[in-house]
Amino acid sequence: MLTEYNISGRIILPTGVKQILLSEILAFAKETLEERVSENILVAYCKQLSLQFQCKVCLWKTKEEYGNLNVFNGGSDFDVINEECFLCIYENGIEILQEKTPYWNNRIDKVLFEGN
């Protein structure tokens, strides 16, 4: 089985959206591997950035486990068999949302595609 992690975020400034780089998140967490960055660290960083920039900040982490799935035609396919998603949103230091779900829902779509 293969496990893949994705950690990212956005700062929603009045002048536009700034992507938070993985390297910035890892530096804040004092870690070198994505899987070691805890949800508590993401929440702390999200809150700090929202206070620093006085705006809305969104951070998320996804853990995807890949393995063989049985498909309709009787064969198998290597695909995501388990997913854990975490999203936190702060605005001006105040928590707007913090949730852990077994898959991405429409809240992350709003962050990714609408920028707010």
Image: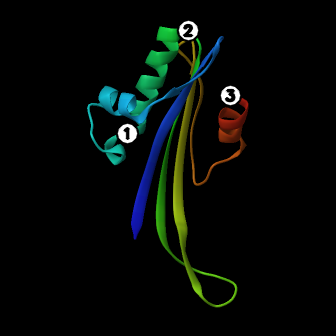
Query: Which is nearer the N-term, disc 2 or disc 1?
Result: 1
Q: Could you tell me which residue is drawn at 48 percent across and 19 percent down?
A: 47
Q: Quadrant of residue 74?
A: bottom right
Q: Quadrant of residue 48?
A: top left
Disc 1 residue type? Ser
Query: Which is nearer the N-term, disc 1 or disc 3?
Result: 1
Circle 3 residue: 115
Q: Could you tell me which residue is drawn at 64 percent across and 82 percent down?
A: 71
Circle 1 residue: 38
Above or below — where is 8 with respect to 55?
Answer: below
Q: Residue 92, position in %: x, y?
A: 56, 11
Above or below — where is 101 with respect to 22?
Answer: below
Q: Residue 61, position in %: x, y?
A: 48, 42
Q: Residues within 10 Å of mark 1 (few under 14, many from 20)?
A: few
Closer to us: mark 1 or mark 3?
A: 3
Q: Residue 80, position in %: x, y?
A: 54, 65
Closer to us: mark 2 or mark 1?
A: 2
User: As rendered, which of 75 and 16 lies closer to the eye?
Assistant: 16
Q: Tell whether label 2 touches label 3 (CB within 8 Å).
A: no
The image's colouring method is: rainbow
Quarter of the image where the C terminus is located: top right
Circle 2 residue: 54
Element marked by disc 2: loop
Q: Residues within 10 Å of mark 2 (few under 14, many from 20)?
A: some
Quarter of the image where the N terminus is located: bottom left
User: Can residue 89 be seen?
Assistant: yes
Q: Could you tell me which residue is drawn at 43 percent across and 50 percent down?
A: 5
